[in-house]
Amino acid sequence: MTMQHQHRILALLLPALILLGCMNDESTPQQPAEPTAPVVSERGPETGPLSDSGLRFDGVYISREGNIFYLLRFFPQGNVTVINGPDSTNGDFLRKMIAKQGLEPNPVIGLYNVPVERCDDSLHFSTKAMRGLIEYDGRMHGPDSLHFLKYSHINGRKAMYAYGFSPDAQQ
């Protein structure tokens, strides 16, 4: 099975797994989970501090497609700063732009600072671009790896992105 085929299958299954994992319907009988299924929280999705989430806050999560970089920086207070775009400095310029917690969003340049919903190892947030909404549904795969299904309500495009952690440079 090719990597592209695996990403397509994951892109189709991930939203359903996340939605099912975060639902809390008292009338639905609980079925035993398969060993690979995510752990289901009885609380449902929550916003708030991410300090106990397993995410890292001492750098950025980066995904790259050609010369386009996608960066996420999570903060313990419960938000994520998102920026993407071309970068001839291998992501360093974009990294410097999202280093601060109180950063003001600027949709004109694709810079967002939004709250994160969490349900166990699943994360959800959305950004409001100038022309519409973009949703991010993802899962943590250890502290250094995230996978997000990104869905654009603007053009209907869905794409799966794998993010790897890159720590801040030591001063």
Image: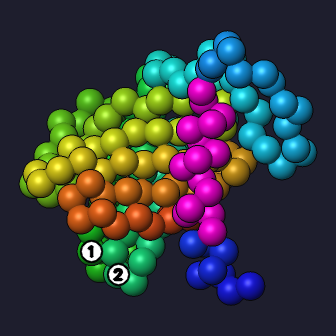
Front-lying residue, 30 or 140: 30
Q: Position of residue 124 (x, y in %)?
A: 47, 39
Which stretch is magenta? 9-23
Amino acid residing under circle 2: Asn
Q: Residues within 10 Å of mark 2 (few under 14, many from 20)?
A: few
22 on left or right of 130:
right
| In the depicted structure, whether residue 84 falls above or below residue 87 | above
Identify the element where label 2 is drawn. loop
Residue identifier under label 1:
86
Front-lying residue, 70 or 3: 3
Residue appearing at x 40%, y 39% in the figure: 125
Q: Position of residue 60 (x, y in %)?
A: 47, 52
Q: Earlier in the sequence, mark 2 or mark 1?
A: 2
Tell me, for residue 67, which label it has, or none.
Answer: 2
Q: Residues within 10 Å of mark 1 (few under 14, many from 20)?
A: some
Amino acid residing under circle 1: Pro
Q: Position of residue 135 (x, y in %)?
A: 36, 48
Q: Main secondary structure of the magenta part?
A: helix
42 on left or right of 65:
right
| In the depicted structure, whether residue 27 falls above or below residue 64 | above
Cα separation, mark 2 vs mark 1, equals 5 Å
Q: Position of residue 100 (x, y in %)?
A: 31, 38
Is residue 131 magenta-colored? no
Front-lying residue, 110 or 40: 40
Q: Quadrant of the N terminus?
A: bottom right
Q: Is residue 97 visible?
A: no
Q: Quadrant of residue 33?
A: top right
Contact, mark 2 vs mark 1 (Cβ under 8 Å) = yes
Tell me, for residue 142, which label it has, or none.
Answer: none
